[in-house]
Image (cartoon, grey):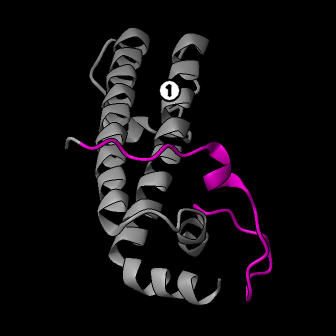
Amino acid sequence: MGATLPRTTRADYLKRERVRHWTSNPDALREPRLLARRLRHWTRAQHKARADATWRKAARVRATWNRCFRAACLETFGREPEPGDYRIAAVGRDEFSEHWKRLLRSAGYGLSRVADVAAAHEYCALNWGRYHRQVEHSR
């Protein structure tokens, strides 16, 4: 991929807006129409490229979490992780040292944020024509 994608900011994703039929004010990660409205100059290919790049980043973050979880299990229990070892969201086990819990928490929450961005861009790419027409008509 030779062309660079336009830059985005946290506000593009996290700024909350009122949306019809919502009881709360969602951000663009919960309501992709907001992302389409904010990034109206993006093409379908740009959304797809950002989604693909972000999914690759999510895979790297998941691999980091898996390596940390394995190392924490080896250090704490002296064995490979088992399916029943995952008991606490993002952290895994309360018995892990604070060092491992901090690393696991950071990777787990980071994975969630990265996956949300990827899913929003993928949704915009798949439904680009519909949202692009809505944005054009709302000008």
Quadrant of the snapshot with the C terminus: bottom right
Q: Quadrant of residue 58?
A: top left
- Magenta: predominant secondary structure element? loop
User: In terms of depth relative to the viewer, which is nearer, 80 or 10?
Assistant: 10
Q: Is residue 85 above or below residue 119?
A: above
Q: Quadrant of residue 23?
A: bottom right
Quadrant of the snapshot with the N terminus: top left
Residue stretch rendered in magenta on the structure? 3-29
User: In terms of depth relative to the viewer, which is nearer, 99 or 44?
Assistant: 44
- Give the farthest residue toward the left: 1
| Residue 114 at x, y percent in the picture | 47, 45
User: In terms of depth relative to the viewer, which is nearer, 22 or 75?
Assistant: 22
Q: Is residue 75 above or below residue 88?
A: above
Element marked by disc 1: helix
Left/right of residue 87 with respect to residue 27 in the rendered view: left
Numbered-mark total: 1
Residue appearing at x 33%, y 75% in the figure? 126
Q: Amino acid at mark 1?
A: Leu
Residue appearing at x 33%, y 11% in the figure? 78
| Residue 7 at x, y percent in the picture | 50, 43
Residue appearing at x 71%, y 67% in the figure? 26
| Residue 104 at x, y percent in the picture | 50, 26
| Residue 63 at x, y percent in the picture | 30, 31
Report which residue position mark 1 lands on: 104
Q: Is residue 47 above or below residue 110?
A: below
Q: Residues within 10 Å of mark 1 (few under 14, many from 20)?
A: many
Left/right of residue 85 with respect to residue 9 in the rendered view: left
